Amino acid sequence: MNALHHGTHRLGLRIYFEDTDAGGIVYHANYLRYAERGRSEALRSLGVPHAEMIATHGRMFVVRRANIDYERPARLDDWLVVATTVLAIGAAQVTLDQTIWRDDVALVRIKLGLACIDAVSQRAARLPAPMRTALERMRMDGIADGRVAVEGT
């Protein structure tokens, strides 16, 4: 599963032995890797993958802030879905909500702040117009569908 629908991108993934700790549950830091995959695939679905953003616009995202709530553990062989929605868009930043689900149970909730930076100077830089347009479209689709709360407007 890798789909953008009603303002939310969903990426499915399986938990393998390498993802788990000695107790058979997913190691806590791996959830950040899953969230990164979800963000990367969401951007690709919007038509603005990371590689293009860097090559064409000289811009990239870096994580500025991550607030993580671990609610339940995932285990070996679970099928998870990383759901990504856009909460707010600033001149050089984006706020996302990423929730990792197993069936209809939320396991991990992440509120993430991304900063857009110049790839060379590594200083804050405005979002490129195509990226802004794509993210705004995703956010507005979520608001219209009632799935995303209006934040920062």
Image (cartoon, rainbow, N blue to C red):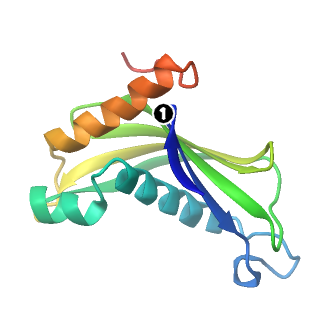
Measured as percent of width and height from the top left, residue 149 is found at: 53, 20
The image quarter in which residue 58 lies: bottom left
Measured as percent of width and height from the top left, residue 35 is found at: 55, 57
**Residue at image coords 45%, 47%:** 65
Depth check, front residue: 80 or 97: 80
Q: Residue furthest toward the right?
A: 23
The image quarter in which residue 15 lies: bottom right
**Quadrant position of the N terminus in the picture:** bottom right
Badge 1 element: loop
**Residue at image coords 24%, 43%:** 131
The image quarter in which residue 126 lies: top left
- Residue 87's place in the image compared with 50, above or below, is above
**Residue at image coords 24%, 37%:** 132
- Residue 146's place in the image compared with 91, above or below, is above
Answer whether residue 126 is visible to the viewer in this image.
no
Depth check, front residue: 82 or 3: 3
Disc 1 target residue: 7
**Residue at image coords 73%, 79%:** 16
- Residue 12's place in the image compared with 128, above or below, is below
